[in-house]
Image (cartoon, rainbow, N blue to C red):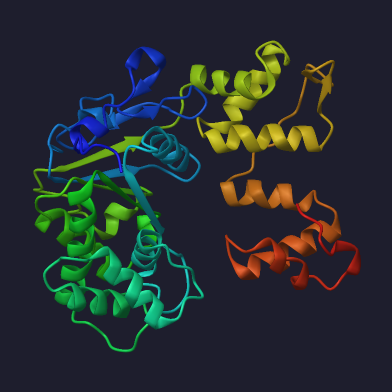
Amino acid sequence: MVPHTGIAALVRLAPAEHGWSGGIRRSPYRSGRLQGTNKGTDGRGGLADADAATDHACHLFTILGTAGVGKSRLMEEFVRSVDGRATVLRGRCLAYGQGITFWPVAEVVKAAAGLSDFDEPEEVERRIADLLVGVEHAAAIAGRLAEVIGVTSGSAPPEEAEWAVRRLLEVIGERGPLVVVFDDLHWAEPGLLDMIDHVSDAARDAAILLICTARPEFLDARAGWAGGKLNATSILLEPLTDAQSESLIANLVGSTGLAEEVRSRIVQAAGGNPLFVEQMLAMLIDDGLIHSIDGRWVATSDHLTVSVPPTIAALLSARLDRLEPEERDLIGRASVVGKVFYRPGSPSTCQEPSWTGRSR
């Protein structure tokens, strides 16, 4: 465990002269402009401006942005920047399913305790208890957490579940800086949002940084999110400027590989969305409209026609349509499992012998 320097120092790890802001690397192809939407930001929107997050305090930091604008990349850069200097736990909200209210909490608890999805209930409780050695009411906390994550029967009252999760995070945060990331909060159930609210309000004597990512429509259902909290900050990731989109293209295919008219068409079509830029370049490569010559990407024509999918879903669908039938079939079968699945299990989802052991 690293020295306990506190969250205030944690979010100021990297020097600005190297292109970092508040511990987040502002890559020209992913950063965009950050605009503060709450106390604690200065218009640049860096995590470095979270002055309320002092030693032994809990700070709630929310990153808002449309799909594809760069929330995940921003988080990946921040998590990478604190690697080895803080404990990082992460959970993702699911868009569908039954009994998924506390799925992100289950991921956080399992990561903290070093658990797998296949551990027996007794092992789960034992490992959680190991995290709580010497803590008052350790058995009660471990029991409630086991119920929250669904490995034992019983349904803890909401206030007891919130208490148990808060105490676990406090215990970890007392030992060193703790970063807890909840991705895709726009899909979260009210029970989870209430729990995060409780932790951010009631956690004491522990260095905890709660980071939530969500799409802007999240505020339609939770308009008062983080409102009135002293240790809360929200930022909005806006679309890339044309210059930033140009920088993204240069990062991906080189600054001199494409004619200016071609780059301009891509920039205009993307509308400032980094994912659009990346995927449209990938589509152009798949269609043979951009190809590599002596290590440089060049267009087959200076008068390139760029089609504009109306949504990210349509864009990804268009890319899937370009795959071979066998490839689409494999992806379709794997998608039944979910976003994450084990490689040894993927061949069994496909009946074609020719795909056994093949990875894409």
Asked if residue 149 shows in the view, the reply is no
Query: Which residue lies at the image location 63% right of the left edge and 50% below the top edge?
Result: 314
Residue 194 coordinates in the image, percent (x, y): 20, 65
Image point (17%, 63%), residue name: 167
x and y percentages locating residue 68 in the rendered image: 50, 42
Farthest residue toward the front?
134
Q: Which of 311 and 1 is in front in this view?
A: 1
Determine the residue positioned at 85% across, 60% down.
326
Residue 27 in the image, given as x and y percentages of width and height: 47, 24
Q: In this view, does 347 lie to the left or right of 249?
A: right
Residue extending furthest bottom? 153
Left or right: 329 in relation to 107: right
Left or right of residue 90: residue 250: right
The quarter of the picture where the N terminus appears is top left
Residue extending furthest toward the right: 354
Viewer-closest of 121 and 307: 121
Quarter of image, res 350: bottom right
Decide which of 358, 120 is in the foreground and name it. Answer: 120
Is 357 above or below relative to 162?
above
User: Is any atom of residue 307 visible in this view?
Assistant: yes
- Judged left or right of residue 289, residue 158 is left
* Quarter holding residue 281: top right
- Where is residue 199? Give x, y as percent: 17, 58
Which picture quadrant has residue 81?
Answer: top left
Count of numbered labels shown in the rendering = 0
